[in-house]
C-alpha cells in the first residue's frame, strides 16, 4: 500500500513532446512508472519513448485507461490542461510547472473538488512511491521503499528528507511534493489524512516554510491522527519582510513566521525537527 | 506586483469608481504648475510602494502653488521605509464627512475571494481587525461566482451607509469586485472610501497588488506604463547586480556565501548555518533548471563579495540537473577563478555526469580546484553546513 500512486497507476504525460516532458517521461519510464501515453495537440498519432501521443486528454484516457496525469506545460496552459484531465476522468493531476496564475489554480481546485480528483502543485517536484512509481522530476537516488511518508512545499527539501530516511534505513512509503506556488491544488491536512489511512505509513514528516498558508490547516489533522507527525519549518532565521524565492514565502507581519508555525504544529502534537538529522533520532524515540 | 496609488486609481477609473481629479508630478516645478490648475487647498501625496507614509511625513497640504512647490521639494528629498519619493500625486483636498474601508482579497487557505468592509476607514485594516473585530464585515465568494448588487447593498448598510448612498455604494463595491477578477488582483483596497460633505462617495486612496504570474494576459496595465518593479525598498549594489542577472538574491550580514540550489533549501540552509554557529552573507535562489551561465554568475556574486569568507554549495538535482551544475561551476573556475574556500555537496539527477565533468576539468587544471572540497550523497548536508562554518572561521572571519 501507498498513497496516491503505486505500480498500478496508469500515467498520462500532458506535454509529452516538449523538452522537459520528453526528458522526464524517459526518466519516469526507466524508474518503472507505468506511463501509458501522452498528449500534445497537433501531434496525435505520433509516439514518444514508444508511448502513443494523443491530441487531447479525453482521447488519451479513453484509449489507454490513464487514471493519473502529470503536466509538463508552460504555466499559461495549465488551467486548460488540468481541467481537461479532470473532466476526462483521471483521479490525480500533478502540476509540475511553477508560476500558475492564482485565479487559474483556484478554478482548477474547484473543478477538482467537484469531481473528487486530487490535484498536486503547481511548482511541485511530483510524487514518488519508491520502487513502484515516480511521477515528476524527483531524483531516484534519494529514495528507497520504506515506512515513513513525507509531504513538503519544496522539492529539494523532499530530497534531503528522503535521503536522510533512506540512509538511516527507514525508507519512504510515499513522498508528496505539495508545491511552492502561492495557491496549491492540495493542502497539508488532506495529504496527512491520506497517510493516516495508509497501513504502510508508520510516521509522516511534514516540512513547510515561511509565508505558506497551508501549514496551519494541518493542526486539526495532527491532533486527531494516530500516526505520529514530525514537523520542520524553514525560515526560522529569515529576515522579516524579505521575499526569499518562492512567491509564497514572504512573511506578512506576525502571521506566517516559521517560529510561530512550528509552535502551532508542536502544540497540536507534532514532533519538531530542526535539521534532517533530527528526524531519525525522533523516529527512534517513537519506535517507528 | 504592488501598484502605486495613482496607477490603482487610474485602473479604478476605468471601472467607473469615482476618484479625485488629481495629477501626477515629478518635480517641484511640475507640482507648482499642476496646483495652479486645481482648487486649493491641495494634498500632495508621496507615491511609494509601502504603507505608513502619512506617519512618515509623506503627505502634505498646500494652500497655494508656491507653498506646494516648497512642500514638493521636501517630499522629493524624503525616503519612506527605504523607498525614495520620486513621484507626487496632487489632488484637491476632500471635504471628509466620514471614512469607510472596502477591500477584496484572496483567502488562499480556503480558496475563496473575500470582500472586506468596515465603517472604520482610513486606518490600517489589520489594526481594526485586531482592536474591534466586530466592526469588520466579510463575504466569501467562489472564484467563478459573481457579486450581486443586493450583496453590495447589504455590505454598504452594514458599514453604516444610508439610503442616499446605496446606489453609488452598490456601483463602487461591485465594480471593485469585477476589477479584482478582471485584472487578476491579489488585493484591491479603497481605504478610505470617503463620504464628502456633499454626500458623494469617492475613492481617496488605492492599494492594489496584481498577480505577477498573470501579468502576461493583461496588456492594458502594461500600456499604461505599469510594469514589473522592485518592491522591497532600497537595494545594495550587489542586489542590483543580481537583479540585472535575474537572480533572486538578498544581502545578509554574515560571512558564509550561500550557493544552495532552489529556494526551499535556500531558506532551510540559512537556518542550518545559524544552528551551527555561523551567519550567512546572503540568500540566493538558482530557480528551476538554471543554465551553467547563470550558476557561474551566482558564484561571481559570492566570490566578489568581500564579506564572504567561505562558500557553502549544495545541489540536489531534480529539475536542475547535476551536469548543468558542474558545467556552471567549471565555467566559473575557468573564467573567473575561486579565491575563497568552498565546500560543495552534489547529488541527484545526472550526478554521475556531474562528477565526470568535474574530474575532467580537474585533470586539465588541478590548480583551479585547490579551494574546493567535494562531497556526494554519502555525506549528510548537515556536515557540509558545519564545514562551511568552520572554513569561514579559519579563513579569518568570525
Image (cartoon, coloured by chain):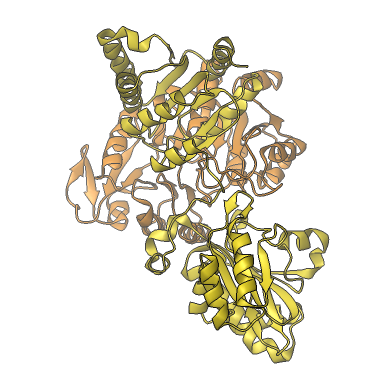
Position of residue A105 measured from the top left corner of the image (x, y, whole percent)? 48, 56
From the rendered image, report the letter of the chain displayed in yellow: B
The quarter of the picture where the C terminus of chain B appears is top right
From the rendered image, report the letter of the chain displayed in orange: A
Figure check: A278 above or below A54: above
In this view, the residue farthest toward the front is B66
Q: Residue at x 33, y 26 (%)?
A: B328
Position of residue A123 measured from the top left corner of the image (x, y, whole percent)? 45, 44
Figure check: B312 above or below B120: above
In this view, the residue farthest toward the left is A46
Position of residue A145 measured from the top left corner of the image (x, y, whole percent)? 48, 24
**Front residue (pair B385, B113):** B385
Q: Is residue B281 visible?
A: yes
Position of residue A121 measured from the top left corner of the image (x, y, whole percent)? 47, 46
Q: Residue at x 48, y 50 (%)?
A: A119
**Front residue (pair B273, A217):** B273
Q: Quadrant of residue A287?
A: top right
- Is residue B59 rendered to the left or right of residue B383? right
Q: Residue at x 28, y 36 (%)?
A: A23
Q: Is residue B114 visible?
A: no
Amino acid at each position: 500500500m501507498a498513497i496516491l500512486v503505486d505500480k498500478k497507476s496508469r500515467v498520462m504525460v500532458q506535454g509529452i513532446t516538449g523538452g522537459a516532458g520528453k526528458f522526464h517521461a524517459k526518466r519516469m519510464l526507466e524508474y518503472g512508472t507505468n506511463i501509458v501515453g501522452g498528449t500534445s495537440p497537433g501531434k496525435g498519432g505520433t509516439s514518444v519513448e514508444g508511448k502513443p501521443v494523443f491530441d487531447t486528454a479525453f482521447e488519451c484516457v479513453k484509449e489507454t485507461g490513464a487514471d493519473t496525469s502529470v503536466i509538463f506545460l508552460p504555466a499559461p496552459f495549465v488551467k486548460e490542461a488540468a481541467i481537461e484531465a479532470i473532466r476526462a476522468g483521471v483521479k490525480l493531476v500533478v502540476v509540475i510547472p511553477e508560476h500558475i496564475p492564482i485565479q487559474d489554480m483556484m478554478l482548477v481546485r474547484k473543478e477538482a473538488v467537484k469531481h473528487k480528483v486530487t490535484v498536486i502543485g503547481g511548482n511541485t517536484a511530483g510524487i514518488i512511491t519508491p520502487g513502484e512509481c515516480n511521477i515528476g522530476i524527483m531524483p531516484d537516488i534519494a529514495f528507497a521503499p520504506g515506512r515513513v511518508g513525507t509531504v513538503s512545499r519544496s522539492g529539494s527539501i523532499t530530497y534531503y528528507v528522503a535521503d536522510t530516511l533512506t540512509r538511516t534505513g527507514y525508507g519512504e512509503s510515499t513522498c508528496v511534493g505539495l508545491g511552492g506556488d502561492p495557491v496549491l491544488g492540495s493542502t497539508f491536512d488532506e495529504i496527512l489524512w491520506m497517510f493516516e489511512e495508509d497501513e504502510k505509513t508508520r510516521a509522516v514528516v511534514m516540512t513547510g516554510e515561511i509565508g505558506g498558508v497551508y501549514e496551519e490547516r494541518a493542526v486539526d489533522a495532527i491532533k486527531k491522527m494516530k500516526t505520529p507527525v514530525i514537523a520542520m519549518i524553514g525560515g526560522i532565521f529569515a529576515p522579516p519582510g524579505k521575499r526569499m524565492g518562492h512567491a509564497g514565502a514572504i512573511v506578512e507581519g506576525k502571521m506566517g513566521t516559521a517560529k510561530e508555525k512550528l509552535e502551532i504544529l508542536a502544540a497540536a502534537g507534532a514532533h519538531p525537527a530542526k535539521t534532517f538529522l533530527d528526524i531519525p533520532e525522533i523516529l527512534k524515540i517513537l519506535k517507528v | 506586483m504592488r501598484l502605486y496609488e495613482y496607477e490603482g486609481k487610474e485602473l479604478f477609473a476605468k471601472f467607473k469608481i469615482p476618484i479625485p481629479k488629481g495629477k501626477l508630478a515629478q518635480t517641484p516645478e511640475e507640482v507648482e504648475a499642476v496646483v495652479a490648475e486645481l482648487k486649493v487647498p491641495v494634498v500632495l501625496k508621496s507615491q511609494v510602494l509601502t504603507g505608513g507614509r502619512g506617519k512618515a511625513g509623506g503627505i502634505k497640504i498646500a494652500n497655494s502653488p508656491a507653498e506646494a512647490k516648497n512642500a514638493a521639494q521636501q517630499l522629493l528629498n524624503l525616503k519612506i521605509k527605504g523607498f525614495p519619493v520620486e513621484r507626487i500625486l496632487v489632488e484637491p483636498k476632500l471635504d471628509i464627512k466620514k471614512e469607510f474601508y472596502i477591500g477584496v482579497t484572496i483567502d488562499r487557505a480556503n480558496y475563496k475571494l473575500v470582500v472586506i468592509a468596515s465603517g472604520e476607514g482610513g486606518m490600517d485594516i489589520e489594526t481594526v481587525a485586531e482592536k474591534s473585530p466586530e466592526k469588520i464585515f466579510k463575504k466569501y465568494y467562489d472564484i467563478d461566482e459573481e457579486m450581486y448588487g443586493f450583496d453590495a447593498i447589504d455590505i454598504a448598510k452594514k458599514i453604516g451607509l444610508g439610503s442616499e448612498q446605496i446606489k453609488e455604494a452598490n456601483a463602487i463595491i461591485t465594480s471593485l469586485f469585477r476589477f479584482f477578477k478582471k485584472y487578476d488582483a491579489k488585493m484591491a483596497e479603497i481605504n478610505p472610501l470617503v463620504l464628502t460633505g456633499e454626500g458623494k462617495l469617492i475613492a481617496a486612496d488605492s492599494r492594489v497588488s496584481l498577480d505577477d504570474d498573470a501579468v502576461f494576459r493583461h496588456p492594458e496595465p502594461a500600456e499604461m506604463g505599469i510594469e514589473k518593479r522592485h518592491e522591497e525598498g532600497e537595494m545594495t549594489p550587489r542586489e542590483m547586480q543580481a537583479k540585472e542577472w535575474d537572480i533572486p538574491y538578498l544581502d545578509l550580514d554574515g560571512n558564509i556565501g550561500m550557493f544552495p540550489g532552489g529556494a526551499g533549501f535556500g531558506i532551510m540552509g540559512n537556518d542550518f548555518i545559524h544552528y551551527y554557529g555561523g551567519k550567512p552573507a546572503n540568500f540566493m535562489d538558482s530557480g528551476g533548471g538554471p543554465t551553467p551561465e547563470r550558476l557561474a554568475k551566482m558564484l561571481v556574486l559570492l566570490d566578489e563579495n568581500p564579506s564572504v569568507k567561505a562558500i557553502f554549495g549544495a545541489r540536489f538535482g531534480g529539475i536542475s540537473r547535476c551536469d548543468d551544475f558542474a558545467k556552471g561551476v567549471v565555467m566559473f573556475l575557468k573564467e573567473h577563478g575561486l579565491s575563497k574556500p568552498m565546500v560543495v555537496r552534489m547529488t541527484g539527477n545526472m550526478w554521475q555526469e556531474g562528477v565526470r565533468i568535474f574530474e575532467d576539468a580537474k585533470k586539465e587544471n588541478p590548480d583551479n580546484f585547490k579551494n574546493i572540497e567535494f562531497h556526494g550523497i554519502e555525506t549528510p548536508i548537515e556536515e557540509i553546513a558545519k564545514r562551511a562554518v568552520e572554513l569561514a572561521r579559519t579563513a579569518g572571519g568570525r
